[in-house]
Amino acid sequence: MDPAILAHLIAEYTYFIMAPAIFIFGPLVSLAAGVLLRLDAVSLVPTVLALATGELGADILWYWVGRNYGDSFIKRFGRYVGITPASVAFAKELFGKNHDLIIFSSKLTAGLGFSMLILFTAGLSKVPFRRYMMLNIAGQFLWTTALLSLGYFLGHISLKVGDTFEKVALFALGAVVLVSLIGFQRFLRSYITSGQ
């Protein structure tokens, strides 16, 4: 495909692309959207709506899978997405203490890789859907605001950085932070799935 045509399609359908992109790539899309907001490439309201649609669509999907296919999904596909019997048992133990707080805060742990597990377990535990969605929408508001703000700040910094060396150093710092977060996520996930 011609790169010019691809660039035109992305520019024309940016908001329609954001929803499935965040479904696949997660928080990185929100950060990128924040940078695009700072560069005045996108508008705030359609961006927030597109991001929330993608994130809440994923939340509904994982709840539905947990509610309708729970144990059979864990046995067949769980190992591929990090949902193991040990991690579900851990999440159920947390749910027993305070499931409302856990569902609400699952948005804030999305970057650590626990959100999918919590949302799946909410469905498996038969948390009422209306309550589940109210908590997710509230958490989504905070999560989207935080990520867009961080992306906006990073976009502002990149505009202020003058020479090439500073831009490379800023990119390297960002890469180190990202790799550290990924490593921390893997450590926590392996700790939980091993059953402590």
Image: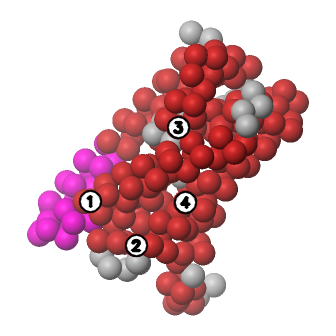
Residue 169 falls left or right of residue 21:
left
Residue 64's x, y, as percent?
78, 44
What residue is drawn where x is 25% and y is 47%?
Answer: 173
How far apart, in angstroms, are the residues tagged by discs 1 and 2?
A: 16 Å
**10 Å neighbourhood of mark 4: few (<14), some, or many (≥20)?**
many
Q: Main secondary structure of the magenta part?
A: helix
Q: What residue does disc 3 label?
A: 104
Work out whether mark 2 precedes mark 4 in sequence or the reverse, and give the earlier one: 2
Q: Of discs 3 and 2, which sits in the foreground?
A: 3
Q: Amino acid at mark 3?
A: Phe
Q: Is residue 92 above or below residue 23?
A: above
Q: Amino acid at mark 2?
A: Leu
Task: Assign the N terminus to one quadrant of the image.
Answer: bottom right
Q: What residue does disc 2 label?
A: 44
What residue is drawn where x is 53% and y is 62%?
Answer: 51
Residue 52's label in the rendered image is 4
Residue 20's x, y, as percent?
63, 64
The number of callouts visible is: 4
What is the secondary structure assignment of the residue under circle 4?
helix
State which quadrant residue 118 falls in.
Answer: top right
Q: Which residues are magenta?
A: 155-176
Work out whether mark 1 precedes mark 2 in sequence or the reverse, and give the earlier one: 2
**10 Å neighbourhood of mark 2: few (<14), some, or many (≥20)?**
some
Residue 154's label in the rendered image is 1
Work out whether mark 3 precedes mark 1 in sequence or the reverse, and give the earlier one: 3
Work out whether mark 3 precedes mark 2 in sequence or the reverse, and give the earlier one: 2
Cβ atoms at labels 3 and 2 below 8 Å apart = no
